[in-house]
Image (cartoon, rainbow, N blue to C red):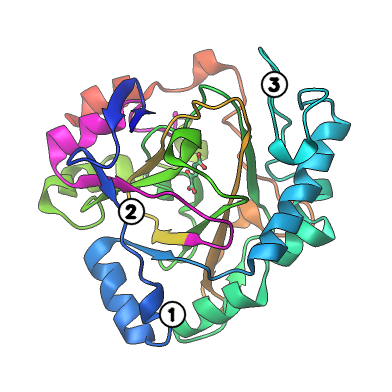
Amino acid sequence: MTIRFGPRDIVYPSTELGELRDSSPLLDDPAALRARMEEDGYLLLRGLLDRDAVLNARQAILEHMDEQAALTPGRPVLEGAMPQGGRTVPMMGRRGVTHAPAVRAVLEAEALFDFYRAYFDRPALTFDYKWLRGVGNEEYTGAHYDVVYMGRGSDHLHTCWVPLGDISVEQGTLAICVGSHNAPGFARLRETYGRVDVDRDRIEGWFSQDPMELSERYGGQWKTAEFRAGDVITFGMYAMHASTTNLTDRFRLSCDIRFQPADEPVDERWVGENPIGHYTLHEDPGTIVRMADARAAWGV
Ligand SMILES: O=C(O)CCC(=O)C(=O)O
């Protein structure tokens, strides 16, 4: 199958974009999960969440989008069809939808807290802010480390990407550059780009709009998967990731959420009743440092 990754049309699965491995058989063995995370830089956990609960959340989100007239009239709401030239509904950090009971039941599910408690070997907390996305046709996420967006607290902060429905690679799935968290080829990148704070440094967050450029220049191998409602993938702050492009006419619904040990410092931007969030990203783009300029200065 030919899919799109950044500006490139590539075949999935292939040596350019391989398949993520499922670590759910290790779920009863936290030491093995930690070792697998060290090795792979991510854990794909199939069926960790209750599938029906995820589908209920999906329905609640699509009804919310339908109320905002974002879906194609005449098509079933549950298809999440996007009209030609349509627009998405901003849902990141919007409590009205992220904390709707059916949605919160998934994003703060007991199964997630149980998993992270076992994995961290101590109680876990999650950020109140939820990065809920309805990603439209032709849209994708460029390659980045999450540390540049949320690096002010715990060193053990993890992202958990939750597909809200069955998502095929051509609808836009999360992809990881396996090796980017520890391979020597990425050392300089971790020491330069990996020390950025987008708000403090007033700089763009994506390292590249062309994810394949990374594996070509620094090594590692991009991998993704077909996701099913109930699956999650978790990874640390230094796993380079991106998404494939949504080539369908249906919104790709997913949410990225964060977990960390409860007894460690917390990045103040993402917690509380009304988290402050990013405070420079949306200012005059002319005053924000371009990643291309920063990269030239770092020599990466
Ligand atoms: O869903 C996406 O397009 C990107 C998700 C992401 O960057 C993340 O989970 O940190």
Question: What residue did someone put label 3 on?
Answer: 87
Nearer the observer, 189 or 226: 226
Q: Position of residue 216 (x, y in %)?
A: 15, 33
In the displayed structure image, the side of residue 65 where residue 131 appears, left or right: left
Q: Is residue 95 above or below residue 31?
A: above
Q: Quadrant of residue 183?
A: bottom left
Question: What residue did someone put label 1 on?
Answer: 119
Q: In the rendered structure, which amino acid carries the disc numbered 2?
A: Tyr
Nearer the observer, 1 or 297: 1
Where residue 238 is drawn, which disc sits there? 2
Q: Quadrant of the N terminus?
A: top left
Q: In the rendered structure, which amino acid carries the disc numbered 1?
A: Tyr
Q: Quadrant of residue 243?
A: top left
Q: CA distance from mark 3 to mark 2?
A: 31 Å
Q: Secondary structure at mark 2?
A: loop
Verify whether residue 225 appears in magenta.
yes
> What residue is rendered at 14% in x and 43% in y?
219
Tell which circle, 3 or 2, labels the residue nearer the N-terminal end: 3
Tell which circle, 2 or 1, labels the residue nearer the N-terminal end: 1
Question: Disc 2 vs disc 1: which is toward the camera?
Answer: 1
Nearer the observer, 109 or 272: 109
